[in-house]
Amino acid sequence: MVEFLQFTLSGIVFGMIYAAVALSLVLIWRGTRLLNYAQGGMAMFTTYVAIEVIYRTGSYWAGFVVALAAGIVLGAAFQVTIIRPTMNKPPLNGVIVTIGLLTLLEGLAGIFFGGQYRSFPAAFSVTGLKIGTTPLGVSRFDVFTAAAVLVTTLALAAAFKYTTAGLRMRAAAFNATIARLSGIRVARVLTVGWALAGLIGALAGVLVSPSTFLYPNSMDTIFVFGFTAAVIGGLDSPVGAVVGGLLLGIALSYVGGYLGSDLTAVVALGVLVVVLMIRPGGLFSAARVRRV
Amino acid sequence: MQSLPRRLGVAVVVAVIVVFLSIKLDSFRDYQIAEIAVEVTAVAGLTLLTGLSGQISLGHGAFMAIGAYTTALLLLHLSWPFIAVLLLAAAVTAVAGAIVGAAAARLRGPYLAGATLMLGVALPSVAYAYQGIFGGDQGLNVAFTAPGFLGATFPLTRWQAWVSALVALITLVLLANLYYSRIGRTWRAVRDDDVAAALDGVNVAAARILAFVVSATCAGLGGALLAIVTGLVAPGAFTLTLSISLLTAAVIGGLGSLPGALWGSLVIVLVPTYVTDLATSHGLSSSVGSNIPVAAYGAVLILVMLVFPQGIQGGLQRILTLFTGPGPKTPTWRHPPTPSAEQARAGQHEKEGTS
């Protein structure tokens, strides 16, 4: 029973990280109809920036803030320079450009920061919390991780719902042509979407790196699971991203705990296939009329 | 390349060139020829799947793994003749392709990409879970030797290059036949507008699944060749990077183009070695030297997509038309397009803008 509780709690923590990656993918998908395969690579790069800042200044929070800012800048810069020119081309071109960006970032990280594994500090203690004498399997930092993602998600949801900028973003995602006719500068809105996605990705990178180490490919697995979570939830739905992330995180935690970590990827594939066979557009997909 | 005799002629010429090169060049270059042949075999199938039938796969490395492990297990336990092993490996991956294709036929765009990506990540991890059969991290050794009649001094790498190039050429000729056949036209119709194709009496799901079977079989053959060329089948060879490099080769060469598959494979195999040599000869440290090809590879992908969206083959064709003027567009349509297809195509252009 204690074991079950531990697996559930640590599943929720990892699930929140997958949810963050999934959310950043959904943000970009809703705006640009493009899957950003470089999301994990961007997060890896900003985490390297964070570790350099922490190393030079000695302050964790300086690195944390710089990483998030770098995420915003990278997201916006990539959208303007290399993504925008692909937007009136077949969708596969954009996909390949983001794959190229991922490879480029991983190569650059190896050149600038070296390929060796580096440990990344955590903001709070990583020793397990206990209730009485029962270990919970999560640490103070894990609680911070889950809370940070939750707060960011809620803040985003509120911004989308209650601010004018959020309304513009929803309008641009809903129908770009009509949004443009109503005077919304859609191109700028899309750039903001990429910047926000960069921010959330950077957050996920900083939060997950204490438990995975940091190296040029360190975010690959996290990205794949985040992507899977987004697909399970349905790429159009931010709520789906969070639900998909938690579902996958908890499922993988049970599998890793009870069956061994060799099978986690196979089980993730199984979950994905089952969900997609029942709902080919993900759990939270709206019924969509395909125009001929 | 629209007639079979011409295709066979080109294949024979290429075969002669490969034999000539493999005798002239040293054994490292022979190994590279074999590597290119492995890559072409797998990429040719993928380029038809994505370029012609319009289905993306980010997990074709999984099919290569199936072909490679089948080959390794058969050679290890049954010591069958290689040709029989190759055929069975192709058959096994064809079945795997049919299963994946049946699931994939329901999925579109990013959902298909997500499912195949996860397949490419998950399948090699089975080798860790069942170490007794698949040898775990260490993998399985593959014993492959040159036949006795060539003499004891015949270099193994040359024989590997010959076998791989032969399989690659046969695959290419067969795929070219498919490309210009009714099946190839069906795939194009499904890619351009599945609803219009269905109205024209095309069984869309069957066409999609068949495309997956064909491309999986090619990837399986590529995997079987990889097994005999590297002499080792281990999960470390079938990472996400492999799957992505296959798609990269297809795109750099020009999606949907079989000559493009060759150009793309040449780039993927030769450029990293070349850049690494260049970096080491300029005295760069190994961590920088080994990462420059990775970065260069990413930059090339982005540039090709922005400057030559049709890949190398598309670029070559554009240069050719400068000299000869616009010739007849391939493939020629035997019958006029139906109104529905025509409208759909007009809509397509509208959506894609000026591409």
Image: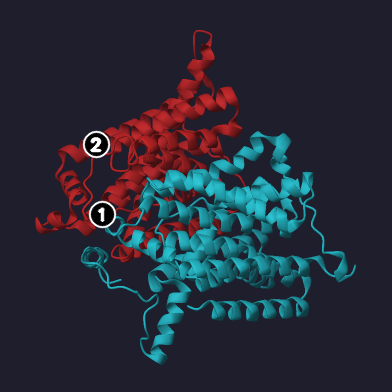
Circle 1 SS class: helix
Q: Position of residue A152 (x, y in %)?
A: 31, 36
Q: Which residue is drawn at 78% across and 44% down?
A: B77
Query: Label 2: which residue?
Result: A157
Could you say which is closer to the camera, residue B254 or residue A29? B254
Foreground residue among A191 and B71: B71
Q: Crowdedness of circle 1 by 10 Å Cα count: few (<14), some, many (20+)?
A: many
Q: Residues within 10 Å of mark 2 (few under 14, many from 20)?
A: some
Q: The cyan chain is which one?
A: B
- Residue B339: image location, x then y, percent: 21, 66
The kind of residue tagged 2 is Ala
Q: Is residue A126 visible?
A: no
Does A18 sit left or right of A106 as displayed? left
Q: In this view, does A169 lie to the left or right of B299?
A: left
Which residue is disc 1 drawn over? Answer: A190
> Residue at left 37%, top 33%?
A244
Indicate which disc, 1 or 2, sits on the residue closer to the N terminus: 2
Report in which chain the residue with disc 2 lies. Answer: A
The picture quadrant where one finds residue B87 is bottom right
Q: Which chain is assigned red?
A: A
Image coordinates of residue A111 in percent, x first then y, are 57, 59
Count the marks. 2
